[in-house]
Image: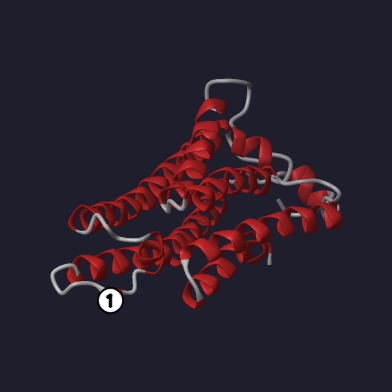
Amino acid sequence: MKLLFDFFPVVLFLITYKLSDLYTATMVIIAASVVQVGVHWLMHRRIEKMHLVSLLLFLVLGGLTLYLRDKRFIMWKPTLINWLFGAAFLATAFIGSKPLIQRMLGSQLEMPDIQWRRLNYAWVLFFLVAGAINLIFAQRYIDAQNQLIASMPEISEQQLTDLNCDGFEESNVPLCELAHQREATWVNVKVFGLLGLTVLFIIGQTVFLMRHMEPDEEHEDNPPADTDSQ
């Protein structure tokens, strides 16, 4: 359930993109992120750091996307947020007494310190890979857009927004279609690819935790009270 709540702005982004264009979808995901933070605050009286960082990046990069009419900024956002979290997890491996993942989950389970460090590095690797995947597909679109602009310097802002190739000269149609295809591919990677990668990683993390947890006799004798999941 929490995973669905975390990703509902992305789902709305996809639906809006399919019905309209990337700029409208950007406005929707900014609004949805504001709602996400607000609803979480009303339900739990606290704000999740990931939600807040994501919202701030949407406000800055999404705002630049809309103000400058430049799709690159919103396309860079998944890479920036993944690499920021990757840097945070990596920093805690050298700063402080516990890695970040242990600080997040250590109150809920017992595990040797070396396994916590390995799990923390696994999160670092996940964030780096997810950010790199997004950047690759974003850059593929940017390259296609630059080729289209170079071939058609008179292209209008609306034509770049819609990428409707019907009104283009025959020589520019393949470049327009390529840009449109790569934009749609980036959206699918952002929504389905990164979500699928996250689900697979969480499954792998669960298997790792089940294999390496140390039994806690005290907890077995005295089961802890239910707490909110992270």
Looking at the image, residue 170 sits to the left or right of residue 75; the answer is: left
Looking at the image, residue 198 sits to the left or right of residue 159; the answer is: right
Furthest residue in direction front, as rendered: 154
State the colouring used for the structure image. secondary structure
What amino acid is at disc 1? Gly
Percent across and percent down for residue 26 are: 55, 59
Q: Nearer the viewer, residue 114 or 44?
A: 44
- In which quadrant of the rendered view does residue 104 lie? top right
How many numbered marks are there?
1
Looking at the rendering, in which quadrant would you find the N terminus? bottom right
Q: Is residue 190 above or below residue 115?
A: below
Q: Residues within 10 Å of mark 1 (few under 14, many from 20)?
A: few
Q: Residue at x 44, y 60 (%)?
A: 190
Q: Residue at x 62, y 28 (%)?
A: 98
Q: Which residue is mark 1?
A: 167
Q: Nearer the viewer, residue 108 or 28?
A: 28
Q: Secondary structure at mark 1?
A: helix
Furthest residue in direction left, as rendered: 171
Q: Residue at x 66, y 56 (%)?
A: 33
Q: Is residue 15 above or below residue 185?
A: below
Q: Nearer the viewer, residue 125 or 170?
A: 170
Looking at the image, residue 53 sits to the left or right of residue 155; the answer is: right
Percent across and percent down for residue 128 are: 41, 42
